[in-house]
Image (cartoon, helix red, strand yellow):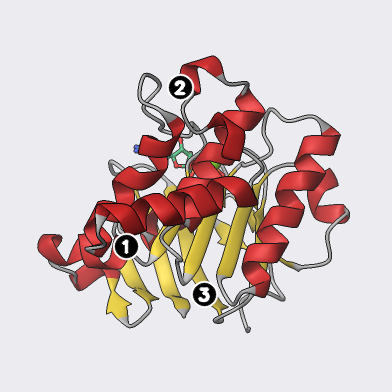
Amino acid sequence: MIRFDEVTKVYDDRIAALDDVNVHVKKGEFAFLTGPSGAGKTTFLKMIYAAERPTSGTVTVAGHDIGRMRRRQVPYLRRRIGVVFQDFRLLGDRPVLENVMLPMTILGLSPAERRRRALQVLSVVGLGQRKDDRPDELSGGEQQRVAIARAIALDPVVLLADEPTGNLDPTLTEHIMKLFRAINARGTSVIVATHDYEVVRRTEARVIKIIRGRVEAGEAAR
Ligand SMILES: Nc1ncnc2c1ncn2[C@@H]1O[C@H](COP(=O)(O)OP(=O)(O)O)[C@@H](O)[C@H]1O
Ligand SMILES: [Mg+2]
């Protein structure tokens, strides 16, 4: 599903953000991407949704070679990948329902079908009652769940989440992790980047550890 072969990423001729990374994430797999701040986690995720290209090596996602992809192909890849951004990237002054429906435009669904799906995923994250509210009126944890609903509404083959439990209390963190588990159980590969080792410790899953751009030995061979 996702393959990194000898991937190195260097920004602005500086030190490598990723250094000779070899990782294979299979369809339906659940993996944590851990490591201290600055390790290269966000860079790893960005390459999967073609926001960055490798400086050398190959990143392959669902058959697409990211480094060789044409710009106009990128939206076709992205409609198969759900991303929960660290800063949510919600439209704060537009209703929650609209935020969830917007990215579905690319799927070519009718407005009625998009609405149906949006309501369904909002109920999955427990926010069905908040559909007409604006993200600006919601708590951080609620905004987080809107971002998750928006990502899963695409019924993605891969779900990526960047520090999804950053500012959440332990109860909400547990709730979000359960949600990711449930999404994973439907066959979606899930990759959660986090520097929170406590979250990793409490969840049974594969752990890909990155330190200064290098994946810790033991992971590379998978
Ligand atoms: N757009 C960018 N331009 C230049 N350097 C960057 C950029 N994005 C990340 N970096 C650098 O790459 C390294 C890895 O960053 P990042 O992938 O964000 O790590 P993490 O998500 O693990 O904190 C850091 O040294 C960071 O400063
Ligand atoms: Mg990061």
Q: Give the numbered dot on residue 133.
A: none
Q: Give the left or right position of residue 13, taking residue 211 as reference.
A: left
Residue pointed to by mark 1? 79
Q: Nearer the viewer, mark 3 or mark 2?
A: 2
Please state which of residues 191 and 151 is positioned toward the viewer in this rendering.
151
How far, Cα to Cα, is label 3 from label 1?
Answer: 25 Å
Give amino acid for label 2.
Arg
Please state which of residues 14 and 99 is positioned toward the viewer in this rendering.
99
Question: Is residue 3 placed above or below 135 in the rendered structure?
Answer: below
Residue pointed to by mark 3? 22
**SS at mark 3 in the image:** strand
Name which residue lies at 57% across and 21% down.
138
**SS at mark 2 in the image:** loop
Name which residue lies at 37% across and 67% down.
80
Where residue 47 sits, quadrant-wise, is: bottom left
Residue pointed to by mark 2? 134
Residue 72 is situated, as x and y percent measured from the top left of the image, at: 11, 62
Name which residue lies at 55% across and 45% down.
122
Query: Farthest residue in the top direction?
Result: 137
Give amino acid for label 3.
Asn
Viewer can see residue 208: no
Please state which of residues 151 and 197 is positioned toward the viewer in this rendering.
151
Question: Is residue 190 placed above or below 4 in the rendered structure?
Answer: above
